[in-house]
Amino acid sequence: MTVHSFVKGANTASHLRSPAKRKLDERSRGTAASPAAETVPRTTLRLPSSAAFHNKKVQPGSQPRKVNRFPIGAATREFYRLNYPGTSADEWNDWRWQARSRIRSLEELERIFDLSKDERAAALQHKGSLPVGITPYYASLMSRTDASEPLRRTHIMVPDEHIRMPGEEDDPLGEDHDTVVPGLVHRYPDRVLFLTTGFCSTYCRYCTRSRMVGNPGGEYNFSTSQWEKALQYLEEHTEVRDVLLSGGDPLSIGDDKLDWLLTRLRKIKHIEFVRIGSKIPAVLPMRITRDLVKMLRKHHPLWMSVHFTHPTELTPEVTEATNRLADAGIPLGSQTVLLKDINDDAEVMTELMHGLLIRRVKPYYLYQCDPIKGSSHFRTGVAKGVEIIKALRGHTTGYACPMFVIDAPGGGGKIQLAPDSIVGRDGDDILLRNFEGKVYRYPDPGGKLGADKPRARLAAE
Ligand code: SF4
């Protein structure tokens, strides 16, 4: 670990703080590699409209074409000038250029980052699914020098990834067991998980589907003929009313193909509700083009769950992406995995949840990290998640509080964990503890809830 090399002259106290919290402190002092979105001067790119580009006259009365503006944070701009000289701002803001230019090899990693010995050894040892994959944009948010920096830890492998601890599985949620046709998981009566692709624009080292993503020759060979089989299954199963498109990342699919899939799903009368699960707004925000949102809004009601990890991700680019989606009427919820020394800190989590809210994303799930093979270095104790919820609930806006859940290994589904607020019972009153730890009565004549607990002393008594 090169914790101390990240901030020159940082004081000892800051070194004693958790890496996740220290990163926030560095950002507020403006010493981190990637300044907070709010501290970055906002620069707007203006691409030529197609009329201007082709030197066409705009007809009087016609709507001027909307300019495809995307801001670029100052640190990101500096990063791409340094590491991708000759790249124009238009290219940088082209999601296909970003996808093509992903960092995918040890050579490229070493060109961008000062790799630690551990990172280098792990990259050399890696084979199979979940390869390294980082968009240049997302790399611009990471520290070049500090291997313990939160976002870098989530995307560059270390040797711990190759250690399988007791209880860890390749498929801890038992998705393969509930797969009814390749890529379609039908566990709950009224809803399905539709795995649309094995491709992601970045590969998270703690991915629940690490067994299959980024592995085109592997277990799942995604294709439109496979989609057809899934669609046929859905047409026949009238009990399914809710489809979650996931993967891989569904937003990595081109507009036409995704439009085709959504249109086919919308033609199935009993499907009321479609959700898309994606990390793209956080790691490749320029994918949220105006054409994409125009296409998506044809398929309402459409919801989106967006995967966020750390406040460093909340850049001006991400603000633009979530605004575009929200303006298109797509309700946005967040999913965050609780990760050791990355975001397992109440202050970090509060900043992330507040940042999401103001970007019109409702914090939805905080997940205990799934016990996939090689995840022990990412997993916190379960108590940490409850402690974080305790620090949020009542202390900040209710909308900013996600549900803390464990996706039960073996296919048990999501189980919510929350601080226990039922203290006990006193006759017709239930005794409840509030966020300050004080106990209050609520009249509940004839109720039984809390009767099995010993009577607690009321704070008021
Ligand atoms: S974006 Fe999602 S599916 Fe892709 S690697 Fe990350 S967690 Fe896994």
Image (tube, rainbow, N blue to C red):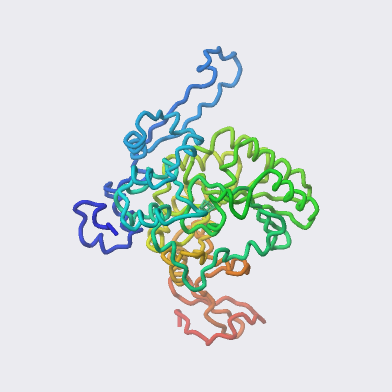
| The one of 134 and 294 positioned closer to us in this rendering | 134
Residue at the left extreme, as displayed: 9
In the picture shown, does residue 62 fall above or below 183? above
All told, the count of numbered labels is 0
Quadrant location, the N terminus: bottom left
Q: Residue at x 55, y 52 (%)?
A: 213
Residue 207, x across and y down, in percent = 51, 57
| The one of 453 and 122 positioned closer to us in this rendering | 122
Quadrant location, the C terminus: bottom left
| The one of 389 and 372 positioned closer to us in this rendering | 372
For the question of whether residue 37 can be seen, the reply is no
Q: Residue at x 58, y 69 (%)?
A: 408
Residue 386, x across and y down, in percent = 47, 69
Q: Would residue 398 appear left or right of 239 to someone viewing this image? A: left
In the picture shown, does residue 446 fall above or below 331? below
Which quadrant would residue 315 be assigned to in this image?
top left
Residue at the bottom extreme, as displayed: 454
Residue 72, x across and y down, in percent = 40, 36
In the picture shown, does residue 8 fall above or below 406? above
Residue 89, x across and y down, in percent = 41, 30
For the question of whether residue 291 can be seen, the reply is yes
Q: Would residue 266 appear left or right of 195 to someone viewing this image? A: right
Q: Residue at x 54, y 59 (%)?
A: 208
Which quadrant would residue 256 be assigned to in this image?
top right
Q: Would residue 11 appear left or right of 101 to someone viewing this image? A: left
| The one of 190 and 65 positioned closer to us in this rendering | 190
